[in-house]
Amino acid sequence: MKRLRHNYKNLKIWQLGLKIPNDILDLLIEFPKHEKYDLSSQISSCSVFIPSNVAEGSSTTNKAFSHFLDIALGSSFELGTQLLIANHRKYINQNQLEVVENKIEEFQKMTMSFQNNLN
Protein backbone atom coordinates (compact mmCIF):
# COMPACT_ATOMS: atom_id res chain seq x y z
CA MET A 1 0.00 0.00 0.00
CA LYS A 2 1.43 3.33 -1.09
CA ARG A 3 1.67 6.00 1.60
CA LEU A 4 0.47 9.38 0.45
CA ARG A 5 2.52 12.30 1.72
CA HIS A 6 1.28 15.86 1.77
CA ASN A 7 3.51 18.80 0.90
CA TYR A 8 2.65 20.96 3.89
CA LYS A 9 3.71 24.17 2.14
CA ASN A 10 0.92 23.62 -0.38
CA LEU A 11 -1.75 23.04 2.28
CA LYS A 12 -4.08 25.98 2.85
CA ILE A 13 -4.41 25.02 6.52
CA TRP A 14 -0.65 25.30 6.97
CA GLN A 15 -0.53 28.62 5.09
CA LEU A 16 -3.28 30.07 7.27
CA GLY A 17 -1.76 28.48 10.37
CA LEU A 18 1.51 30.26 9.62
CA LYS A 19 -0.22 33.65 9.60
CA ILE A 20 -1.47 33.19 13.15
CA PRO A 21 1.92 33.16 14.93
CA ASN A 22 3.03 36.12 12.83
CA ASP A 23 0.02 38.11 14.07
CA ILE A 24 0.62 36.88 17.60
CA LEU A 25 4.28 37.87 17.66
CA ASP A 26 3.27 41.40 16.61
CA LEU A 27 0.80 41.55 19.52
CA LEU A 28 3.27 40.23 22.08
CA ILE A 29 5.63 43.15 21.53
CA GLU A 30 3.15 45.30 23.46
CA PHE A 31 2.70 42.91 26.39
CA PRO A 32 4.00 44.03 29.79
CA LYS A 33 7.52 42.86 30.62
CA HIS A 34 6.32 40.89 33.66
CA GLU A 35 4.33 38.61 31.32
CA LYS A 36 7.41 37.64 29.29
CA TYR A 37 7.73 34.17 30.85
CA ASP A 38 4.10 33.58 31.68
CA LEU A 39 1.12 34.36 29.46
CA SER A 40 3.08 35.74 26.50
CA SER A 41 5.30 32.65 26.46
CA GLN A 42 2.25 30.38 26.50
CA ILE A 43 0.56 32.37 23.73
CA SER A 44 3.70 32.28 21.60
CA SER A 45 4.14 28.53 22.04
CA CYS A 46 0.52 27.72 21.21
CA SER A 47 0.56 29.84 18.08
CA VAL A 48 3.78 28.21 16.82
CA PHE A 49 2.44 24.70 17.55
CA ILE A 50 -0.44 25.24 15.12
CA PRO A 51 1.47 25.27 11.80
CA SER A 52 4.28 23.13 13.25
CA ASN A 53 1.95 20.20 13.92
CA VAL A 54 0.41 20.48 10.46
CA ALA A 55 3.90 20.36 8.95
CA GLU A 56 5.07 17.48 11.15
CA GLY A 57 1.94 15.42 10.52
CA SER A 58 2.11 15.89 6.77
CA SER A 59 5.00 13.44 6.58
CA THR A 60 3.04 10.59 8.18
CA THR A 61 0.16 8.29 7.30
CA ASN A 62 -3.33 9.77 7.09
CA LYS A 63 -4.25 8.24 10.46
CA ALA A 64 -1.19 9.75 12.14
CA PHE A 65 -1.69 13.03 10.26
CA SER A 66 -5.19 13.23 11.68
CA HIS A 67 -3.71 12.92 15.17
CA PHE A 68 -1.28 15.80 14.49
CA LEU A 69 -4.21 17.87 13.21
CA ASP A 70 -6.00 17.14 16.50
CA ILE A 71 -2.99 18.54 18.34
CA ALA A 72 -2.94 21.64 16.09
CA LEU A 73 -6.66 22.13 16.72
CA GLY A 74 -6.14 21.76 20.46
CA SER A 75 -3.42 24.41 20.34
CA SER A 76 -5.76 26.72 18.43
CA PHE A 77 -8.49 26.37 21.07
CA GLU A 78 -5.95 26.89 23.84
CA LEU A 79 -4.65 29.99 22.04
CA GLY A 80 -8.18 31.36 21.78
CA THR A 81 -8.61 31.04 25.54
CA GLN A 82 -5.27 32.70 26.25
CA LEU A 83 -6.17 35.60 23.97
CA LEU A 84 -9.41 36.09 25.90
CA ILE A 85 -7.35 36.29 29.09
CA ALA A 86 -5.01 38.81 27.45
CA ASN A 87 -8.02 40.88 26.37
CA HIS A 88 -9.49 40.69 29.87
CA ARG A 89 -6.14 41.89 31.28
CA LYS A 90 -6.20 44.72 28.68
CA TYR A 91 -2.97 43.53 27.01
CA ILE A 92 -4.84 43.45 23.69
CA ASN A 93 -7.92 45.38 22.66
CA GLN A 94 -11.20 44.00 21.31
CA ASN A 95 -10.30 44.69 17.68
CA GLN A 96 -6.93 42.91 17.98
CA LEU A 97 -8.69 39.98 19.63
CA GLU A 98 -11.31 39.71 16.89
CA VAL A 99 -8.77 39.82 14.04
CA VAL A 100 -6.84 36.87 15.45
CA GLU A 101 -9.98 35.04 16.60
CA ASN A 102 -11.33 35.17 13.05
CA LYS A 103 -8.16 33.57 11.69
CA ILE A 104 -8.22 30.93 14.41
CA GLU A 105 -11.88 30.09 13.69
CA GLU A 106 -11.18 29.88 9.95
CA PHE A 107 -8.20 27.60 10.66
CA GLN A 108 -10.38 25.36 12.84
CA LYS A 109 -13.14 25.04 10.24
CA MET A 110 -10.72 24.38 7.39
CA THR A 111 -8.73 21.87 9.44
CA MET A 112 -11.78 19.92 10.57
CA SER A 113 -13.01 19.74 6.99
CA PHE A 114 -9.58 18.66 5.73
CA GLN A 115 -9.37 16.08 8.52
CA ASN A 116 -12.78 14.63 7.61
CA ASN A 117 -11.54 14.13 4.04
CA LEU A 118 -8.44 12.28 5.28
CA ASN A 119 -10.54 9.56 6.91
Image (tube, rainbow, N blue to C red):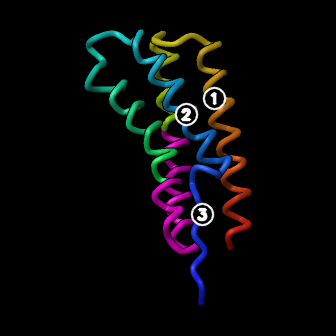
Q: Which residue in the protein does label 1 denote?
A: 101
Of helix, strand and loop, which mostly describes the magenta segment?
Answer: helix
Give the amino acid type for the residue marked by disc 3 in the picture: His
Residues at badges 3 and 2 in contact (C-beta under 8 Å)?
Answer: no
Q: Which segment is the magenta one?
A: 54-78
From the viewer's side, name the closer residue of 40 and 88: 40
Identify the image quadrant of residue 8. bottom right
Query: Which residue occupies 57% across, 32% down?
Result: 19
Identify the image quadrant of residue 63. bottom right
Q: Element type at marker 1? A: helix
From the viewer's side, name the closer residue of 6 and 66: 6
Q: Element type at marker 2? A: helix
Q: Residue 67's x, y, as percent?
A: 52, 65
Query: Which residue occupies 59% across, 90% down?
Result: 1
Q: Element type at marker 3? A: loop
Q: Using a 10 Å C-alpha cutoff, classify the residue at mark 1 as few (fewer than 14 neighbours), some (14 to 19) or many (20 or more).
A: many
Q: What is the spatial separation of the Cα atoms under label 2 and label 1, in whole angstroms? A: 7 Å
Q: What is the spatial separation of the Cα atoms under label 3 and label 2, in whole angstroms? A: 27 Å
Q: Earlier in the sequence, mark 3 or mark 2?
A: 3
Give the amino acid type for the residue marked by disc 2 in the picture: Gly
Q: Earlier in the sequence, mark 2 or mark 1?
A: 2
Q: Residue 99's x, y, as percent?
A: 65, 21
Q: As displayed, is residue 76 above or below residue 85?
A: below
Residues at badges 2 and 1 in contact (C-beta under 8 Å)?
Answer: yes
Query: Would you say 46 lies left or right of 76 here?
Result: left
Q: Residue 32's x, y, as percent?
A: 34, 9
Q: What is the spatial separation of the Cα atoms under label 1 and label 3, in whole angstroms? A: 27 Å
Q: Which residue in the protein does label 3 denote?
A: 6
- Residue 75 is one of the magenta-drawn residues: yes
Give the amino acid type for the residue marked by disc 1 in the picture: Glu
Q: Which residue in the protein does label 2 denote?
A: 80
